[in-house]
Amino acid sequence: MTVQPGGRSPAPPHLAPLQDLLNTVNLESGEDELAPASFAAWAGARGVDDADEADRVRLQVFREALRDWVGTHDEQVPAGVAAGIAAARLRVAVDGGRLRTTSRTAFGRLVAELVEGVRTAQRDDGWSRLKICDRGSCRWAFYDHSRNNSSRWCASSICGAREKSRRAYRRRSHPDAGGAPVEHERSARVDP
């Protein structure tokens, strides 16, 4: 489980795999756990030791399609997400008297649990609480535990403060509609 910014609580267990996948990349630093150098370790930590380069690339594409979908919460499953789910070749199996989503492909085993988590969240209405930070250079996935489900940033103390400062600076620097800074008149001193 990835540490959440600002001391935020993570998503419920059924959405944790999706939140973790979405947060495998830090857009500000460029660090990506799905990069070629780190992907095998990431997949191995999830019990999938046979994932290859095609699985890695497919997972990165799927991650970004999921991020866009979480950002909009469209009722329709977007084409990129549907294509990823189809490529996973998921199937439902009975395991110890319980239904479990699984796959014979490495890619499918990497995403099976998160796909099932999305289905559960859509049923229990927790889906709308998984959000993407509004700060464009962050886009971190977070779970909104607020009573009115109105959080916009992964952490108000980090991205919220930065975004508010950026907007305030823009208003001070570009107060007119044209965006050009306004020159302040100085009183001219006249010497007698």
Image (spheres, grey):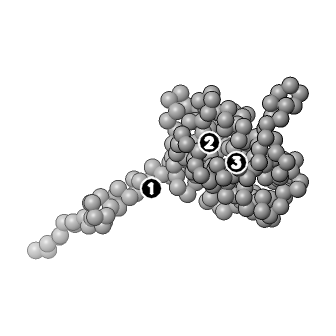
Instruction: Kindly report which numbered mark, 1 or 3, lies closer to the viewer in this rendering.
Output: 3
Looking at the rendered structure, the secondary structure element under dot 1 is: helix
Mark 1, residues whose alpha carbon is within 10 Å: few (<14), some, or many (≥20)?
A: few
In this view of the protein, can residue 38 be seen by the observer?
A: no
In depth, the one of 172 and 118 nearer the eye is 118
Measured from the top left, where is residue 118 in percent x and y?
A: 66, 38
Measured from the top left, where is residue 70 in percent x and y?
A: 58, 45
Q: Which numbered disc, 2 or 1, marks the residue that appears first in the sequence? A: 2
Q: Residue tagged by mark 1?
A: 166
At x 49% / y 35%, what residue is drawn? 150
Quarter of the rendering containing residue 53: bottom right
Instruction: Kindly report which numbered mark, 2 or 3, lies closer to the viewer in this rendering.
Output: 3
Q: Which numbered disc, 1 or 3, marks the residue that appears first in the sequence? A: 3
Q: Could you tell me the amino acid type at mark 3?
A: Ile
Q: Could you tell me the amino acid type at mark 2?
A: Phe
Q: Which numbered disc, 2 or 3, marks the residue that appears first in the sequence? A: 3
The Cα–Cα distance between marks 1 and 3, rounded to whole angstroms, is: 38 Å
Measured from the top left, where is residue 188 in percent x and y?
A: 17, 70
Measured from the top left, where is residue 47 in percent x and y?
A: 87, 47
**Position of the N terminus by quadrant:** top right
Instruction: Kindly report which numbered mark, 2 or 1, lies closer to the viewer in this rendering.
Output: 2
Q: Could you tell me the amino acid type at mark 1?
A: Arg
